[in-house]
Image: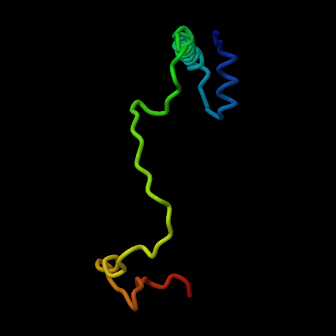
Amino acid sequence: MSLDKDTVRRIAMLARIKVPEADLETMAGELNNILGWIEQLDEVDTDGVEPMTSVSDFRPELRADVVNDGGDAERALANAPENANGFFVVPKVID
């Protein structure tokens, strides 16, 4: 596949990218190089290769999804600038 200036102009218009007329030829060459690299990927034999989302087989340990009270309220409030009756005190934001 080869892109010409008119095709690059149309792609730029569809992408809402302003490409100066003088740069269309250069852009066509760059896009043709990219498409050439993509065409090279079609030549790679991928039969028997499992699709993957990561380069490692790392599987994070999942914890049980249980509802609880959050644990220790005193520890949660220990670094709070201000607390009252077991709750965080924050500035009023609505009058």
Q: Point out residue 49 in the picture as x, y percentages from the top left corner.
A: 51, 19
Q: Quick check: 29 above or below 21?
A: above
Q: Quadrant of the N terminus?
A: top right
Q: Is residue 93 left or right of residue 80?
A: right
Q: Residue at x 38, y 90 (%)?
A: 84
Q: How many marks?
A: 0
In the shown orientation, is residue 92 left or right of residue 83?
right
Query: Relative to 14, does residue 5 appear above or below in the rendering?
Result: above
Q: Pick the residue in front: 58 or 4.
A: 58
The answer to whether residue 36 is visible is yes
> Do we see residue 29 in this rendering?
no
Q: Nearer the viewer, residue 21 or 14?
A: 14
The image position of residue 18, as x and y in percent, is 61, 31
Q: How is the image coloured?
A: rainbow
Image quadrant where one finds the C terminus: bottom right
Q: Residue at x 68, y 29 (%)?
A: 13
Residue 62's x, y, as percent?
44, 52
Percent position (x, y) of residue 38? 55, 15
Q: Residue at x 53, y 16 (%)?
A: 48
Near-viewer residue (81 or 28) = 81
